[in-house]
Each structure stands twice: as structure tokens, then as C-alpha cells.
Image (cartoon, coloured by chain):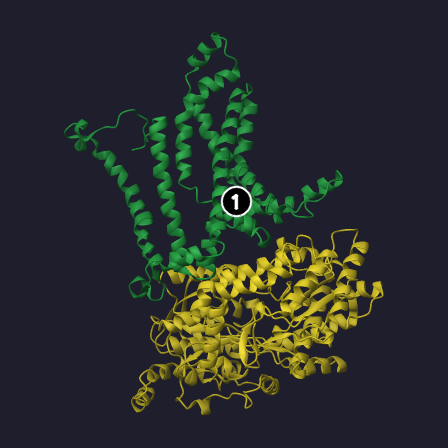
Amino acid sequence: MKKLKFGAVVMAAVVSTPMLLSGCGQEPSSPEATSNPPEASDSSEASTESQGETDSEPQGTAEDAQWLTPFEETVKLDVVVGWDADAGVKEGTTPETNALVEAARDLLNIDLNFLWMVPNDQFSEKLALQISSGNIPDIVMLDSGNFYEFMSSDYLRDLTDAYETCASDELKNTVEGFGEEAVRYSSRDGRLYGIPAQLDTSESVAGLYYRSDWLDATGIGTPTNVEEMNDMLVALAGYGASVNGGKDTVGLGTTSSVLNTNFALSAYFQCYGAYPNKWIMRDGALVNGIVQDEMLDALNGLKDLYERGALAADFATWNSDQFNERVTTDQVGAAFGTYYIPAWPLNQNKDANPEAEWAELNIADIGSKPAMNQVSINHFNVVTRDAPENAEAALIKLLNMTLAANGNSTFDKSVFEGRDLPENGASIFYLPVYMYFPTPWKQYRENIRAAYEAQDPSGLITNVEQEWYGYMNDYLTNGNACENLGTAWGMYKSRLSEDMGIAIGLAARETGEYEPAYYYGPATKTEQRVSSTLSDMAVTFIVEYIMGQKGEADWESFKQSWNEMGGQAWTEEVNEQYKSITQ
Amino acid sequence: MTYKKERPGKAAAPKGHFKREYPFYLMMIPGVVFLLIFSYFPMFGIVMAFQDFSPLKSFSGSDWVGLRNFKDMLMLPTFWTVVRNTLMISLSKIVLRLLVPLVIALLLNEIMSIKFKRISQTVFFLPYFLSWAVIGGILRSLFQYDGMVNGILTSLGAERIMFLGSNTWFPVIAIVSDVWKDMGYNMIIFLAAITNVDPALHESAALDGANRRQQAWHITLPTIRPIVVMLLVLSLGSVLSAGMEQILLLYNPMVYESADIIDTLVYRLGLVNHQWSLSAAVGLMKSAISFVLVVFSYRIATKYFDYQVF
């Protein structure tokens, strides 16, 4: 400690750094020296390649992990958490009894005080209420809207020094591995105010999952253009009803949230080159895809599908539960979704009907471009203004710990003494902060396939690789006779298949055949005021158009209303902010 | 609550009445404190409607914007549709919540079998204890496109109806299900009031040749009128509350035109989109109109039905 205090004197110019040092057990250093981002950060393709090459290497041992040094004085943090009980975690475990909370106390001297715990789907509203009451947790995960509002209100603590001093290589790799954008979007005036939890953007690419056994039975070939795709959807509806006992059957299943990506119609519009609610670049400026004329072609396509019985007559009353129920009971011929759809909910159909076969149509194969987000930040991990001393370093250490305890990590987990294992009551999902471990898709897929070919999984390092290998081996060896068919099939098809699931997103990234969705930034003034109104208006218009209550003559008035209601001002503000962030 | 013809004037109060009645004032204290803390103190939040409010800046740090939020509220494209829907659904509920329980109470009162009467009361009252989450699920199963009701219709050779996606049917289902759920409560109140009707009046009427229907119309109903008026006055205060929980669970984009109400709009603006000030403005507008309606209905009740609370 004396040495650390001496260090603090030397670093007197940096007022906050001495506090951080006391917890991190290492000298501060320049960003260049401590952070180790992939070199080619301008290109997201290159950055992922780099991740793929580096992530499978061991990240460090407990001895090397200086961040594991405990704070001299206990750091007590008020936290909140959204969680859902995980069947894989020891029964009766709650966020408060999470073994990792105990590990944080013992290894880092961080004491988490849970103000409340709610199911995940209630977290956002509960947090909104908490914020409105003015009683803000010390560390918390914020969505984009809240993050920028907090930052504008000077309500966030500067994490720059804590990040540079305490972040593990794994954390830095995770934050910076996707390129510069995420750090830029998390900073103001060169100072870091949030640790962005990102998803691999190839995971945002959607495709059309369809019942290939039904398509084969109809004798129709795989579609090569949009018209053939529409014909396929009509044929699937007809054939499905003929083999499922005459139950209501749809060619294309969708919920009422038509502009979502999963089990919805956002990707259908992409087949026509339309990108509703995405900011796309046209003539050097960002425009919102919802008011581009390509929308009209897609709307006419959907109206035609509705009239031909490929869409449910009451599709706009479906929620996700009803969608899942119908998928499971052979009442849905196809649905749009991202890579994980086979693992949920298509797996339920496979469990109910092992003979059901699904394939995925890559939007690029019908001459269109799927959308891919330029940056995909799920949330920001932050420290709020009134948090106690050393909270910044505590946040970084907790994030280090969540990554070290992740099944993808090669970190030497012996330091946890079993307190990282689900069977001992540990879950990284029960913690109040979270970082996605960037899955090195390419590396994992190659490793696991090679292990399967050799029938030797001993070279697979991470828990996740070994788990996925098990699913692949089980399904490919036993086919529909494997014990946990739905899970094994779903995990294999979503993660390891050649032509389905994540393979589609990875292919889009490799070939560059995608439409970049730009701008991930603070909600503009106009957006805050009108976005919900505009969104409701768009959804209502789309539903009414599909059902024939609106026609082409109404399209221009819709565009005009959208712009007049604030869409035009919103677009101008987005362009201004985009320029200010990217310049 | 009292029901009396003359208002007690201050001069009528005998000296020392406070000393005599202070135990009653003491008993009022918890209720008054509760009211102050949970009803009056939060009213300070009304200022939010006149600010560009941010919880992080609190009331003192948020900018004042005058009536801009109210202007924005009126500019919302769905605002007047939402007001119309709210009034239509709410007024229908208010009227039917009085009429249906009243009729059922009158009919139950005529039943001779005590056992059957009690079972019936229990059956009518049971739905009151079910949450909207449960009833919402039941209604969806019953009325969805491939649900039970449409199954019956098709088996009878009729066309299926998109009940939950129809701007005609949705409000009907919302109103009827709400009345069905809550009718037991008012029914019990009416039954209690009917029990208090002096049996001598019925006996006299019977001697004069009045049948059961005439007795109900000329004796029972006039006697329980104050209770009916009281329930009406109380419910008018919530004329702009059309049942948020129920609508939120059942509605979808196909029926926004007929089902979106003020409360669902406030919910979306405030809790979903964090537009606190706009949400507060809509809420304040609702409270102000409700207040006027309560005063108005109270005046009407006093003038025409001789009914007083204060």
C-alpha cells in the first residue's frame, strides 16, 4: 500500500488514478501499452479475424491476473438485476446467493447489495421507475437511450483511468475487438463513460427459415428470386395444411411486431432492398429506410401473400407465444430470424415432430442484401455519479471476472475454487453487470469440425467448444434418434452447420454482400419526442396495407405524415450527430 | 358518508363539539396522513408536465417549457382517437357496471331458495378475484381466430370472425368482459341495499295488488336510489380510466384505432419511451377533466337526487 501511495504522489497530476491503483495492484500505463486491440480496427472483418486468431490462445493465468488483487477496504455497491432462473444452475440459486457474488467478495473485496431483482422482461420498466425516483444504483447496465441521457446530464463517472489500469486483456479484447466505433460511441471528449457490451454484428443478419421437408414434397426448387420465394411461401401454406390435419397453416409466420427481426417481417422488406427503421446511406447522407420507395414493392408483396393465404388472417394479433405454439404444432411453413432461431424456437418443432426438416434461405441468394449493423451494442456498463470511492475500478474488476468465468474463456479458473460452476450455484447471467464474450465463430467452427472428423475432442480448449462438439457429435451420429434431439439439432444447426444459422451471417461478412445499418448514437431531441409515435404509425400503416385497408395511393401521404410528424427533423439531427461522432 | 336534506351550518355546531368529538378526529389522523403522503405529496410531480423533465436533473435542474408538452400532446396524431376510445369504452363500462349488477341483484332478491341464491352470488362474485392476466389468457383462447368461439361458429356453418383484430368486435369484448369480471362487486352492494328495504312497504304494496315487477319498480328501486347515485358519482371520477391493464393485455396494432386509450398512451410514452413530461401532461389533462366531471356529477346528484357527501 505504501508503494501504491508513493505511486499516487508521482501521478499527482491525475487526481483519480491513485484511488484506482490501490485496487488494481499495477502501475498505470499508457493506452498503447495496456490495451491490446486488434491492429486492423477500421475493418470489422479484419477485427473479427484477429479475434478469431487470438481468442483461442490462453488469456492468462490467475498468477498473471493482477486485477484479482482485492481492495484494501470493502467496496460496497448498490446494484439491481434482471434475471431468469436458469435450469442449468444449482436449484434455488438467486442473484444474491450466486456463487460469483461470493467470489467477488472473497477475491476482490467487493460487496454487492441488491436493491431489487426482477425477471428480465420487467427490468427495463423497473429501472425506469427506479431512475424516475432519483435513487440510482451505483453500477448498472444502461440501454442506449439511458446511457446518452446519463452522459449528457453528467451523471456518469469517468472510467478511462480505471479501464486502462484494471481491465484484463480479455476485457480489452472484448471492448476494442470490433473496431473503434464502440469505444467512440461510449466516450465523450476522449473520456470513456461506459463499457460497451457488444454482439458480433454478423449475428444480426437474418435469413428465411423454411420447412424443407414440405418444400421437397411440393417438388418446388429452392427460390432464386423474390417472386419464387413468394410462390414458395404460398405453396408451404397449402402443403402444410394437407399434412397437419387441416389445421390453420401459414406460409410465413410473423408476430404483430412486424418491424422486428425475429419472427417478424423486417427481413422480408430486405428482400426488396427496403430497410425499415434502419439508417442506411443514400447519396452520402443517412436516411431512414421506412420512408424509402422500396418499401412499397415489399408492401405489395406482403399484400399479395396475405390475399393468397400465405400470411395468417389474424397475424397482427399474434404475440411470440402464439407464434411458438404454431411453429411447434406444424402450422408455420417459414419465418425470418437471426442465427439462433434453430436453437429456439424451431427446436421445439423438432422435438414435437422429429421428421420436420428446416433449411435457411440466404437473402443474398435471391439477389438481395441482408442488413448488418455497423456496431451492435446491447448495453453499457456504467458507474453512476454518487457511487462510492473505487466504484470505477470495482466495475472493471467485476467485468474482468464475468469474462474470466465465461465458458468461452481460457482463463485459469482454478482461482474460483469451483465458484464459477453452474452446479455450484454460479451464473454470470445473475450478475448486475455483463459482457458478451465475443464468440470466435470461425475458429470454433474449424476446431469443432476438425475434432468431429478425427472423433477426438481432446484438443478443444474451452467449455463451450466441448459442449458444442457434444451436440454436433450426438446429432450427426444418431440423427433423429439422439436423446435430446431438439437441443442437439438446434445447437448444431444454429452454430455449426455449413449453410444455416451463423454461417449465413459469416458468409455475408466475408463476401461483403450486406447493407450496412449505420448510426448507433444518442437519441436525438426529436427522436425522444416522436419515435414511439412514428413507430406506432408505421406499424399500423404496414398492417393496414397488408390487410388491404390501405393502398398505393396512401403511400405518399404516409411518407409525408412521417416526415411532418418529426421524421424529417429526426433525420437531420441523426446526420448531424453521425458526422460529429465519426469525424 | 351521510344522506341528509339539510347541510349542517357552522352556526349549528354546538360549542365544545371538538372536545366531544376529538376521538373521531384522532381516528382520522392515519387516513389523513396516508392521503397526504400518497395522494397530495406526489402532486408536486405535476410540475413535470411544464418542464423538459429529466430524472437525472430532478425538478430543480430541468428546464421550464411552459405549455409545450400540452401542445405536443394535442399534436399527437392519435390523441383525439385515444380520447374518443377512452370515453366510449369507459362510459359503456360505467353504465353497464350499474345496470347489469342491478338487474342481477333484483332477480336474485326474488329467488326463494336460499341455497341457490348463495351459490349464485358466489358464482357471480368469483370473477372479481381473478387477475386480468388470467382473464386475458382465457379471452385470447376463446376469441382468437382459431379459438373456441370460432370453432363453434364454423361447426354451425358460419364464417369465422377476427374478434381480437376487429375494430367493431374488440371494444365489445373489452366492455363485456370487464362488466362480467366486476359485476359481482356492485351486485353485493345492491343486494345489501335491497335487504334494507322495509318489508312493510312490500307487504302494503302486495295488499294493494302490486305484483313483484311493480314492487321492484315502485318500491325497491326508489329506495335504493341513493346507493345507485353514489356508485354513479364515484364511477364518474374514473370516466377517463377505461381499464389499462385489460386493454394492454388484449390489444394489438390492428385495433389501435378502437382500443388505444389514454392510459395505454401514457404507459407507452412514460415507461416505454421515457417521455416523462409528455406523459405527465397527458396524465394531468386526464386528472383535470376527471376532477371537473366529479364536481359536475356531484352537483347534479345534489340538485336532482338530493344526494350529499359533504
Q: Residue at x 52, y 27 (%)?
A: B103
Horizontally, residue A493 falls left or right of residue B43, namely: right
Q: Is residue A257 visible?
A: no
Does A373 sit left or right of A23 as displayed? right
Residue drawn at (58%, 50%), measured in percent from left and top? B255
Is the residue marked by circle 1 packed among few (<14), some (14-19), or many (20+) residues within 10 Å?
Answer: few
Q: Position of residue B149 (x, y in %)?
A: 67, 41
Q: Colour of chain B?
A: green
- The relative height of residue A574 versus residue B173 in the rendered view (above or below) is below
Tell me, what hue is chain A?
yellow
Q: Secondary structure at mark 1?
A: loop
Q: Is residue A220 visible?
A: yes
Q: Which residue is mark 1?
A: B131
Query: Which image quadrant is residue A384 in?
Result: bottom left
Q: Is residue A554 above or below residue B22?
A: below
User: Left or right: where does residue A39 sit relative to residue A342?
Assistant: left
Q: Residue furthest left?
A: B15
Q: Amino acid at mark 1?
A: Ser
Residue at point 24% right, 38% down? B26
| Location of the C terminus of chain B (image quadrant) | top left
